[in-house]
Amino acid sequence: MEVAAAARAPRPEPVPERRALEILYEDDDLLVVVKPAGLVAHPTARQRDGTLLNALLWRAGTAGWTPRLVQRLDRDTSGVLVAAKSAAAHAALQSPAAAFEKDYLAVVWGRPVPPRGRLESALGRDPLDRRRMMVRTSGAPSSTEYERLARSRGEAAGLSLVRCRLGTGRTHQIRVHLAERGWPIVGDPVYGAPPRRRLADAAADRAARGFPRQALHAWRLAFQPPGAQGRLTFEARLPDDIARLLDAAGIRPPAPLGG
């Protein structure tokens, strides 16, 4: 018996859309931008427009280059992203020679102890919910270095600012690693359920429990660009919503992070 299946219609090509971009750097090979929280990085089957890539296509215009995202961030994660302007630049930036260093900042529930360390586990898809990741023996190895930079004290005690450096780049890696250790990211709708015990400081507790997205920010990116003599380093200042959350909790980030 033969069954005839209808051919799947090809996905439409993303179209340029005019949108303001915060650009940190641009040359003939690449563009470095700051993605705000709430913006999808790349079109998906569910969302074909209103993405960062659509905005980059508008910027490319008729200049003869086509944007290719070198890495992606979750919709509600803010921070630094790199886009290549050609297939050759994209391949070079994805090679080991690019030697990317990716540092993130996260506001988490709890106080990471010890104050610095490495989180390692095998991560794979949750068989009951393919949108989630979880620790699985059959998963891919993953590694995250972390450092507790500051924490709330007194009646606001119970929140910490953590820097994370990716050793690998698995989906939702930082979110899963921190949650598995009992330090879920504030506002994370998938992995970050807040503790039942409320903070003694009512204002800090409201600010944390009401935070509308995961408090995760791709803060710093360093890499070796194609054809350049030295490495480039870029930092995206703390977004206003995370800065307000830290202020409500009485957490003062180290000086280089606050600018």
Image: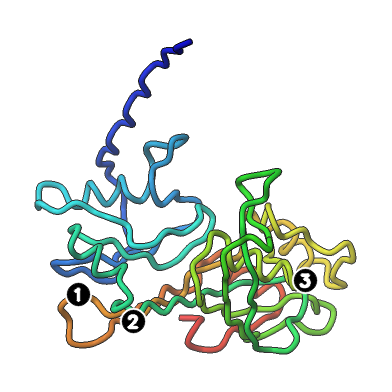
Q: Nearer the viewer, residue 133 or 235?
A: 133
Name the secondary structure under disc 1.
loop
State which quarter of the image contains the C terminus: bottom left
What type is the residue that disc 2 sits on? Answer: Thr
Mark positioned earlier in the residue sequence (2 or 3)? 3
Mark positioned earlier in the residue sequence (1 or 2)? 1
Q: Which residue is mark 1?
A: 226
Task: Give the residue at x 57% y 76%.
Answer: 143
Q: Nearer the viewer, residue 135 or 55?
A: 135
Q: Give coordinates of residue 63: x percent, y percent.
A: 9, 52
Q: Give coordinates of residue 186: x percent, y percent.
A: 69, 64
Q: Is residue 142 above or below residue 15?
A: below
Label 2: few (<14), some (14–19) or many (≥20) C-alpha neighbours in 10 Å: few
Label annotation for residue 233:
2
Name the secondary structure under disc 3.
loop
Q: Is residue 134 above or below residue 177?
A: above
| Mark 2 or 3: the one toward you | 3
Label annotation for residue 243:
none
Q: Which residue is mark 3?
A: 182
Name the secondary structure under disc 2.
strand
Q: CA distance from mark 1 to mark 2?
A: 14 Å
Task: Give the residue at x 27% y 36%.
Answer: 13
